[in-house]
Image (cartoon, rainbow, N blue to C red):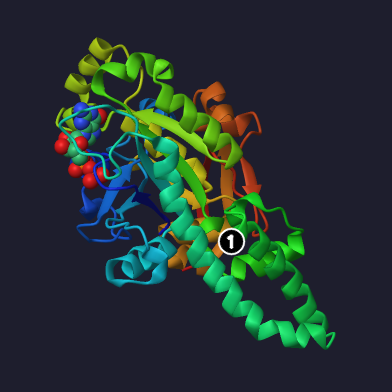
């Protein structure tokens, strides 16, 4: 399963946020594909379409889809030099598919800042630099392997060398790999390097509890937003402290509390949605009388693979998928009417699954 790693300097609010995630989090029993690990929090993906489908189909049970956040503790300056914890930190980042980078934007004299003052850009750069240096090392090692062959005009080596040199130049200017543009062919080579700075990033600006409503007047938030633009990254604003309070509430209490605060959606829900996007994930639904359920898939997969997410047998024996888009189904008002209107398509093995598809798989056992 795809997972996003939560990183940040010490004392920025990572644990507070991660605890909110695990508290609000889903029972792993419902999600057997998820990891059981204290550093992994499973979250359910908020999706109003699932409620609407439930009202339409009136199933016995409704199951949201879920994915994982991994808490990556222990960034230290010098991690890229490969000392103890630092090494571990980098290898944990290597294993995640996207990065949620928590940045301290709240002021609180009682909470020490590792570098003495709240300075989000310097914080961000401290971590990014460690990742860039680790990537520089990866690339330099690789260069020493292909350079000779490239000089001897070996075609493949020359192509790879060009990519590596471009990356090295970027890293030396302290730019991440995601800021470098490549051709499609080159992208494949870059992918094979498993670089840390190729991963997409979301900056999570952690503001004080009284700043949530007017976060844009927080100068630190503004600077993070500007920085993120130059780093092809998005920013969301949360108050980890408020989230830890919200996480203790159940559905109705939560709604009331959010209304009191004057915010339409909790920061955690925003974080979940933004991360879902970041990971390139989308949702399809199954809607039967027994169960209405949302399923996560990676954009770009075809119908049989989507079926395989439910059960490997569905993929192996895949025949076709009865498919209707969520919008068409809602407009029709029932599956029956959608069928009569010709909105339910029979899709085959080559069908690219779309976000919001409601699917029923036919398969041979
Ligand atoms: P970590 O080291 O990044 O995991 O940081 P923690 O989550 O342990 O937070 C460090 C301290 O900052 C804790 O005492 C938190 O209660 C506090 N903290 C976290 N978020 C906020 C916030 O939004 N406002 C204030 N005032 N304190 C916060």
How many discs mark residues in the rendered view? 1
Secondary structure under tag 1 reads strand
Instruction: Residue 54 in the image: state x and y as whole percent.
Output: 36, 30
Q: Above or below — where is 152 with respect to 12? A: below
Label 1 CA crowd tier, 10 Å (few <14, some 14–19, many 20+): some
- Residue at x 27%, y 45% (from the top left corner): 114
Residue placed under numbered mark 1 in the picture:
319
> Mark 1 near ligand 1 (CB under 8 Å)?
no
Q: Is residue 294 visible?
A: no
Looking at the image, residue 163 lies above or below residue 214: below
- Residue sticking out furthest to the right: 153
Ligand 1 quadrant assignment: top left
Residue 145 point in image, percent of width and height = 64, 85
Left or right, residue 211 beside residue 217: left
Quadrant showing the N terminus? bottom left
Along the line of sight, the residue nearer the viewer: 229 or 58: 229
Query: Going by the picture, which residue comes out furthest to the front?
Result: 116
Residue 18: percent from left, percent from top: 25, 44
Q: Would you say residue 355 is visible in this rendering?
A: yes
User: Quadrant location of residue 150?
Assistant: bottom right
Residue 3, picture quadrant: bottom left
Up-down: is 190 above or below 66? Answer: below
Is residue 111 left or right of 114 when viewed as pictured?
left
Q: Nearer the viewer, residue 195 or 301?
A: 195
Residue appearing at x 53%, y 36% in the figure: 227
Tell me where residue 273 appears, x and y as whole percent: 43, 36
The residue lying at 69 percent from left, 83 percent from top is 146
Q: In which quadrant of the rendered view does residue 332 lie? A: top right
Is 197 placed above or below 312 here?
above
The answer to whether residue 136 is left or right of residue 165 is left
């Amino acid at each position: 399963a795809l997972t996003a790693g939560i990183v940040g300097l010490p004392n920025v609010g990572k644990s507070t946020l991660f605890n909110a995630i695990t508290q609000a989090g889903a029972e792993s029993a419902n999600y057997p594909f998820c990891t059981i690990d204290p550093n992994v929090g499973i979250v359910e993906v908020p999706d109003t379409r699932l409620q609407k489908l439930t009202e339409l189909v009136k199933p016995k049970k409704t199951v949201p889809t879920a994915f994982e956040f991994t808490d990556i503790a222990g960034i230290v300056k010098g991690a890229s030099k490969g000392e103890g914890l630092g090494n571990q930190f980098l290898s944990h980042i290597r294993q995640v598919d996207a990065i949620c980078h928590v940045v301290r934007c709240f002021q609180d004299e009682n909470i020490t800042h590792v570098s003495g003052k709240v300075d989000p850009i310097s914080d961000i750069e401290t971590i990014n630099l460690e990742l860039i240096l680790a990537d520089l090392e990866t690339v330099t090692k690789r260069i020493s392997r292909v350079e000779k062959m490239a000089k001897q005009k070996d075609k493949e080596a020359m192509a790879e060398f060009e990519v590596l040199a471009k990356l090295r130049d970027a890293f030396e200017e302290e730019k991440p790999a995601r800021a470098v543009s490549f051709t499609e062919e080159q992208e494949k080579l870059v992918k094979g390097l498993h670089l840390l700075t190729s991963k997409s990033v979301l900056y999570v600006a952690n503001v004080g509890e009284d700043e949530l409503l007017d976060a844009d007047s927080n100068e630190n938030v503004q600077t993070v937003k500007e920085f993120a633009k130059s780093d092809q990254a998005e920013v969301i604003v949360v108050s980890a402290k408020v989230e830890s309070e919200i996480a203790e509430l159940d559905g109705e209490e939560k709604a009331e509390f959010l209304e009191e605060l004057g915010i339409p959606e909790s920061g955690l829900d925003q974080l979940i949605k933004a991360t879902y996007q970041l990971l390139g994930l989308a949702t399809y639904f199954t809607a039967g009388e027994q169960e209405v359920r949302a399923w996560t898939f990676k954009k770009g997969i075809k119908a049989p693979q989507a079926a395989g997410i439910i059960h490997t047998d569905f993929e192996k024996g895949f025949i076709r998928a009865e498919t209707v888009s969520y919008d068409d189904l809602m407009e029709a008002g029932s599956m029956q009417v959608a069928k009569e209107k010709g909105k339910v398509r029979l899709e085959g093995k080559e069908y690219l699954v779309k976000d919001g598809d409601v699917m029923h798989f036919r398969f041979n056992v």
